[in-house]
Image (cartoon, rainbow, N blue to C red):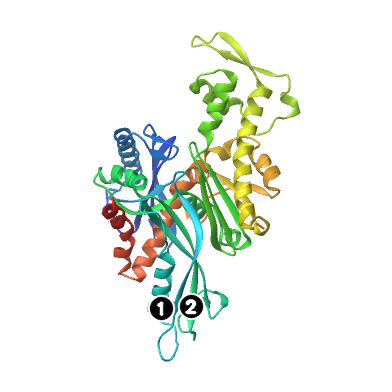
Amino acid sequence: MFDSSSSIVVGLETGTSKVCAVVGEQDAEGTLRILGLGQARSRGVRKGEIVDATAASEDIRAAIAEAEQMADVEIRNVYLGVTGAHLRGFNNRGRHSIVSADRVIQPEDVQDVVKNAKAINLPADHHVVHVVRQHFLVDGHVGIVNPVGMLGAQMEVEVHVVHGITNRLQNAIRAVKGLQLEVEDIVFNGIASSLAVLTTQEKELGSLVIDVGAGVTEYVVYVNGIIKHTGALAVGGDHVTNDLAYGLKLSMGRAEQLKIDQGAALVEEAVKGRSVPLTNDLGLPERSVNLEHLRRIMSLRLEEIFEIIATEVEKTGLLDYLRAGVLLCGGGARIPEVQRLAARVFGLPVSAGRTQSISGLVSTLDQPEFATAIGLVKFGSFQQDRRRGRNSLGARLKSTLTQIFQRG
């Protein structure tokens, strides 16, 4: 076993159905390779948030141990994914006047304008998870990527801010820290998934990434290469299962198995009038379930999820800019016909999200339910690149967690 060096990056997702730890390694050329994966069935998480700290800690420990064994590393630090309906995203603008005599914009001016954009009037119990730079403006000139060295009197920056309730973010952090692991940073799951599945070209063309998980569905919109909108719904695959259990008068376990074995997002003509026999514990026929009814229940719930997202994105005026269409990931992306249903709702091309620019464990990388954990590793590798470039960044990366604990 070799030591956990700076080139090792670990992503940890504490999801509603599974806890997943992914170990990656970045080589000298910057290529990211997945070394190991650990999973455990999640028992202490509901709708993406911890409800049983003891069970969640045990599941995290199991996933970490499996990932360590597969990758042959000792895990000490993780990039932790966070989600939940309390997380919100919005766009904000910061302003800063250039006061130097020569009016040349310095790096310190950039820091000041970003700081002003972060000075957001949020409720006292909320914490900023991300401030994503979109672009700068100098004296009203838009679309500037790097203003340092330019002349100007007034500089502005547009940012996308993701924030959530401090105590609810703390719960996941405390579960990890209780295992003697350090949390390098927290990352909104939706952003992590988008990093895993989008190419640079898809970000530039305009894309909507939807991660349909068991308890939460996250979505992120990129236009012109930058994040323009994010959101999270506390609805996912478990709600489809619950609808089936209620509508078909089945146990949750039986409904989940039927969803996997016989489910689909659309009702085809071929299934009308067909039924599926159910057997008891002895394998004997018990009763039958109408297949059309089963799929209609699934279709209605999934359609509702997509329609809510479409309505939210339409409000922002961004729907017409999604030239690369919609990419689906998460466990829900496995449901047969789900791409066709989404295409019908959004009126856009829809495809399955595939992990990009990563090597190793190819069979794992092709599974849509691992997009978030792999994206967390990718996020961590970006942060390592920045840290190597600016040694002082390490302290700033951890400031998020310091602030959360100070405010707790």
Instruction: Determine if residue 12 is in view.
Output: yes
Residue type beneath disc 2: Met
Dot 1, how many residues are within 10 Å of its Cα: few (below 14), some (14-19), or many (20+)? some
Dot 2, how many residues are within 10 Å of its Cα: few (below 14), some (14-19), or many (20+)? many
Q: Position of residue 92 (x, y in %)?
A: 49, 64
Label 1 sits on residue: 109
Relative to 395, is 237 on the left or the right?
A: right
N-terminal of the two: label 2 or label 1? 1
Label 2 sits on residue: 155
Cβ–Cβ under 8 Å for marks 2 and 1: yes
State the residue at coordinates (74%, 26%).
270
Relative to 305, is 281 on the left or the right?
A: left
Of residues 125 and 114, which is closer to you in this image?
125
Q: Position of residue 284 (x, y in %)?
A: 55, 8
Q: Which mark is residue 354?
A: none
State the residue at coordinates (37%, 54%).
127
Count of marks, rendered view: 2
Instruction: Determine if residue 360 is in view.
Output: no
Query: Tag 2, which secondary structure?
Result: strand
Determine whether 400 is above or below 246 in the image: below
Query: Tag 1, which secondary structure?
Result: helix
Relative to 310, is 94 on the left or the right?
A: left
Quote the CA–CA distance across marks 2 and 1: 8 Å
Residue type beneath disc 1: Asp
Q: Position of residue 389 (x, y in %)?
A: 36, 71
Of residues 93 and 289, which is closer to you in this image?
93
Of residues 59 and 357, which is closer to you in this image?
59
